[in-house]
C-alpha cells in the first residue's frame, strides 16, 4: 500500500476514539440535570418541584445516560433497559433490565410491564425522567390487542430487511403498540406524575417522535400513514393478517389513534450533528480543513457510498469543497437484504465507495456505527480507499460479489480494514470521515 494511504488511514483510525468521546451522552445529560435543593430539580433550564424522582433509561445509550443522570440528581428509583450482553451502567443502584434487539420478544413485554408498574408506585407530584435512545423500539414493547409478540417480531423482520427508513419503520411500530407514540407517558400523566423525556437522536432530522418510536412524544403520524408505508414498500401483502386487520380498523376509527397531545416536556440533547461539529473543531486543531456535508444521510447504503465517492473525487481533482482535508457526514442509510452474508450499512457504504474510487484518486473513507455494532456483525465499520479493490482482487475477493451477498464483513476482515470497538453504550447513528488528498496524520 502506498505511503499516502497508510498516513490517511492512520488519521482516520486516530479519529475513531474522538468520535466515541463526542458521542458519549453522559456529560451531556449531566450538564442538563441539576439538583437545586430538596424537592427541586432543574432539567435543561426548566425547574420541577417534586417529591420523588424516578429515572428510566431505554436504549443503546441507556448505560451512559443513566450514569450521567445519577451523577447529577437524587433519585428514588432508577431503571435501565438495555440489549442483552450490552454495556452495563457504571453507577450503583440501577435496576438493569436486559431485553432483545433488533427484534422484540417476550423480554420486551416484561420490560414494558416493569415500567408501567413503576407508574403505579408513583403519585401526583412525583417526577419521572425518561432517557431515550436508539434501540428502544425493540427493547420495550407491548403489542396492541389482538396482536401477539410473534406478530410484531415477524412484522419487524420484514421491515428491517426491506430497506425502509427508520421514520417509515417507526410510523408503523407506533400503531401496533401500546407504549410507542406517546403512549408510555400516558400511564404516568394519567396519575398526575410529571413526565420528562430527554432524547439521544439516532434518526436523520432528530425528530424526537421517531427516536425509539417516541414513547413520551405526541405522535404526528396516523393509521393511514402506517398502512400507506407498508403498501408503498411492498410489504403489505406479506404482513401478518392480524396486523393488517388491526391497521385497517385503525383507519376506520375502530381502534383509537396514538395521542396527538401530551403533558410532557421533551428535549433532544445529543445528535449526530453535534458529533460532526465536534469533529470539525478537532480537525481544525490538528491542522486539517473540514466540511460538514450532512447529518441526514438516508437511502440504500451502497447508493450513498457511490454518491459520497463522486463528491470526494470532485474535491480531490477540482477542489470543489476542499482540495485537501476531511469531508464529514452522518445519518442512517439502509440495507435491503438479499444475500446470506454478514455485514451492515457502514460496511456496504464503504465497499461501494471503494468500488467507485478504485485507482482514481487519493481519497479514502472510514465509516463507523457509533453503537459499535454494524448489522449482524461484531464490527463497528470499515476503512476503504482507492486501493481497496486492487487489494481485494489480489486476495481473491470481489467487491461486487461481497455486495451481492451482503457479505462485506468478510471482505474487510480479510483486508484487515474492519473498525472494531465493541459495544459503546451510545447511539447517535453512523459517522463517515472522507479523507481527500490527506498525506499526513
Image (tube, rainbow, N blue to C red):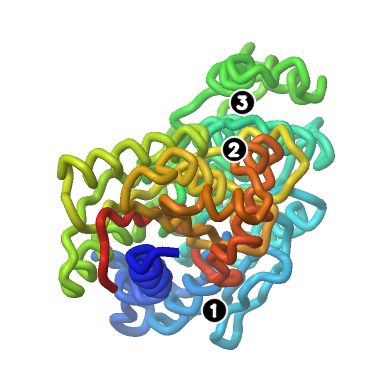
Report the mark closest to the observer, 3 or 2.
2
109 lies above or below 62:
above
Measured as percent of width and height from the top left, residue 355 is found at: 49, 41
Instruction: Name the disc covering residue 232, or none.
Output: none
Q: Secondary structure at mark 3?
A: loop
Q: Secondary structure at mark 2?
A: loop
Measured as percent of width and height from the top left, residue 175 is found at: 62, 31
Camera-nearest residue between 210 and 216: 210
The residue drawn where x is 40% and y is 69% is: 6
51 lies above or below 370:
below
State the separation of the CA atoms marked 3 and 2: 33 Å
Camera-nearest residue between 181 and 204: 204
* Residue, disc 2: 335
292 lies above or below 34:
above
**Residue contact at pointers 3 and 2, CB within 8 angstroms:** no
Residue 361 can be seen in this image = yes
The C terminus, quarter of image:
bottom left
* Residue, disc 3: 256
* Residue, disc 1: 76
Q: Residues within 10 Å of mark 2 (few under 14, many from 20)?
A: many
Q: Which of the 4 quarters of the picture holds residue 391? A: bottom right
Q: Earlier in the sequence, mark 1 or mark 2?
A: 1
**Residue at the bottom extreme of this rendering:** 92
Q: Tally the marks.
A: 3
The residue drawn where x is 40% and y is 80% is: 73
Q: Secondary structure at mark 1?
A: loop
State the separation of the CA atoms marked 1 and 3: 34 Å
The residue drawn where x is 57% and y is 27% is: 257
Measured as percent of width and height from the top left, residue 435 is found at: 31, 56
Residue 87 relative to residue 287: left or right? right
Amino acid at each position: 500500500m502506498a505511503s499516502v494511504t497508510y498516513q490517511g488511514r492512520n488519521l482516520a483510525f486516530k479519529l475513531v476514539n474522538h468520535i466515541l468521546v463526542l458521542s458519549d451522552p453522559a456529560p451531556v445529560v449531566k450538564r442538563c440535570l441539576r439538583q437545586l435543593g430538596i424537592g427541586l430539580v432543574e432539567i435543561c433550564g426548566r425547574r420541577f418541584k417534586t417529591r420523588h424522582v424516578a429515572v428510566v433509561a431505554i436504549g443503546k445509550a441507556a448505560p451512559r445516560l443513566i450514569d450521567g443522570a445519577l451523577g447529577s440528581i437524587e433519585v428514588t428509583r432508577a431503571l435501565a433497559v438495555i440489549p442483552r450482553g450490552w454495556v452495563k451502567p457504571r453507577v450503583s443502584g440501577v435496576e438493569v433490565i436486559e431485553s432483545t434487539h433488533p427484534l422484540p420478544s417476550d423480554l420486551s413485554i416484561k420490560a414494558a410491564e416493569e415500567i408501567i408498574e413503576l407508574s403505579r408506585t408513583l403519585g401526583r407530584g412525583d417526577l419521572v425522567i425518561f432517557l431515550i435512545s436508539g434501540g428502544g423500539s425493540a427493547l420495550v414493547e407491548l403489542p396492541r390487542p389482538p396482536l401477539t409478540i410473534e406478530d410484531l417480531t415477524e412484522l419487524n423482520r420484514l421491515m428491517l430487511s426491506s430497506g425502509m427508513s427508520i421514520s417509515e419503520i417507526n410510523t408503523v411500530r407506533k400503531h401496533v403498540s401500546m407504549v410507542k407514540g406517546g403512549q408510555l407517558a400516558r400511564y404516568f400523566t394519567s396519575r398526575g406524575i410529571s413526565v420528562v423525556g430527554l432524547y439521544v437522536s439516532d434518526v436523520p432530522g432528530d425528530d424526537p417522535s421517531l427516536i425509539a418510536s417516541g414513547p413520551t412524544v405526541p405522535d404526528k403520524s396516523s393509521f393511514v400513514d402506517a398502512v400507506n408505508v407498508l403498501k408503498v414498500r411492498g410489504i403489505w401483502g406479506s404482513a401478518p393478517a392480524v396486523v393488517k386487520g388491526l391497521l385497517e380498523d385503525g383507519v376506520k376509527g375502530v381502534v383509537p389513534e396514538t395521542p396527538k397531545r401530551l403533558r410532557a416536556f421533551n428535549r433532544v440533547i445529543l445528535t449526530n450533528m453535534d458529533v460532526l461539529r465536534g469533529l470539525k473543531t478537532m480537525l481544525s486543531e490538528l491542522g486539517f480543513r473540514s466540511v460538514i456535508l450532512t447529518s441526514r444521510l438516508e437511502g440504500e447504503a451502497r447508493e450513498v457510498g457511490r454518491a459520497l465517492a463522486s463528491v470526494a473525487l470532485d474535491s480531490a481533482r477540482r477542489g470543489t469543497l476542499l482540495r485537501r482535508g476531511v469531508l464529514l457526514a452522518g445519518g442512517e442509510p439502509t440495507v435491503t437484504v438479499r444475500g446470506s452474508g454478514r455485514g451492515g450499512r457502514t460496511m456496504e457504504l464503504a465497499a461501494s465507495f471503494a468500488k467507485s474510487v478504485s485507482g482514481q484518486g487519493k481519497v479514502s473513507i472510514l465509516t463507523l456505527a457509533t453503537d459499535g455494532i454494524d448489522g449482524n456483525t461484531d464490527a463497528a465499520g470499515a476503512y476503504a480507499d482507492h486501493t481497496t479493490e486492487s487489494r481485494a482482487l489480489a486476495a481473491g475477493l470481489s467487491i461486487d460479489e461481497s455486495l451481492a451477498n451482503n457479505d462485506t464483513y468478510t471482505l474487510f476482515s480479510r483486508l484487515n480494514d474492519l473498525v472494531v470497538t465493541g459495544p459503546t453504550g451510545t447511539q447517535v447513528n453512523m459517522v463517515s470521515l472522507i479523507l481527500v488528498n490527506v498525506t499526513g496524520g
